[in-house]
Amino acid sequence: MFRPSHFTAVVLFAIFASVVFGITQRETPRKMVRYGLYCFVLFVGAAFLLSWIMFLIAR
Amino acid sequence: MATAQNTNAASKQDTQQGFVYLPLIAGWLVPGAGHFLLRKWGRGALISVSIVAMFSLGIAMQGKIYGGASDILELLGLLGDLGNGLLYFVSRMLGLGADQVQVTTGDYGRAFIVVAGLLNVISAIDAHNIRTGRKS
């Protein structure tokens, strides 16, 4: 059984979702890569931001 | 110049022949197959690897595979799972995944499986758009 940490699960999710978003939402390979990276940063960045907000609320 | 235009027109006509929904259906049943049919090998391979890996990790995390729809949330989960096409049906036949979420990672796994299905639907529609000429 695979038991990743929450952060590992977020990163894996972000990688696969960003690849598909990049390919399906843009026309040229260069734009696909840029959009994929943009989505990845947003996914992981949002997880960091929300984690800190929840941490500060919980204190 | 005229020859190049003729060649482009001929190749476009070639792609317009046949059953127009084939890449859509193939892409739904097998992740990436719609793009393979359209000779988009790189895109198809990346989509295939991403979706199959996401689904497999979901199963490995003991994620729940929805089998019925007793309420609206179950129905939405089932619709997401159905997006995986043959992966869903084969997993149901083999009894993979968990019936109930019993461990913490099972909830991550459930999300991975549902999202893999939704991404597969997006990919199949993308293949259809390429087939119809709406996208290159």
Image: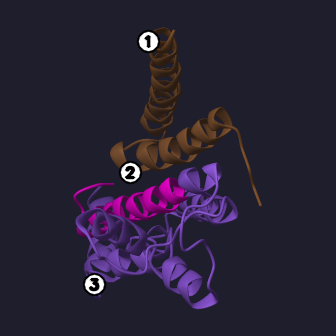
Q: CA distance from mark 3 to mark 2?
A: 23 Å
Dot 1 alpha-carbon crowd within 10 angstroms: few under 14, some 14 to 19, many 20 or more? few
Chain B, which colour? purple
| Position of B93 relative to A14 (above/below) | below
Location of residue B36 in the rendering, given as x and y in whole percent from the top left corner: 51, 71
Subunit ID for the residue under disc 1: A
Dot 2 alpha-carbon crowd within 10 angstroms: few under 14, some 14 to 19, many 20 or more? many
The kind of secondary structure element at disc 3 is loop
Q: Nearer the viewer, residue B86 or A27?
A: B86
Same chain for labels 3 and 2? Say yes or no.
no
Per the rendered image, the range of residues in magenta is B110-136
| Position of A10 relative to B72 (above/below) | above
| Position of B60 relative to A3 (above/below) | below
Q: CA distance from mark 1 to mark 3?
A: 59 Å
Q: Which residue is denoted by mark 3 in the rendering?
A: B17
Looking at the rendered structure, the kind of residue marked 2 is Thr
Q: The chain coloured brown carries which letter?
A: A
Q: Residue visible at 60% across and 57% down?
A: B106
Q: Which of the numbered marks, if any, corresponds to residue B28?
A: none
Looking at the rendered structure, the kind of residue marked 3 is Gln
Q: Which residue is denoted by mark 2 in the rendering?
A: A24
Magenta span includes B123: yes
Q: Residue visible at 27% across and 84% down?
A: B17
Q: Which residue is denoted by mark 1 in the rendering?
A: A57
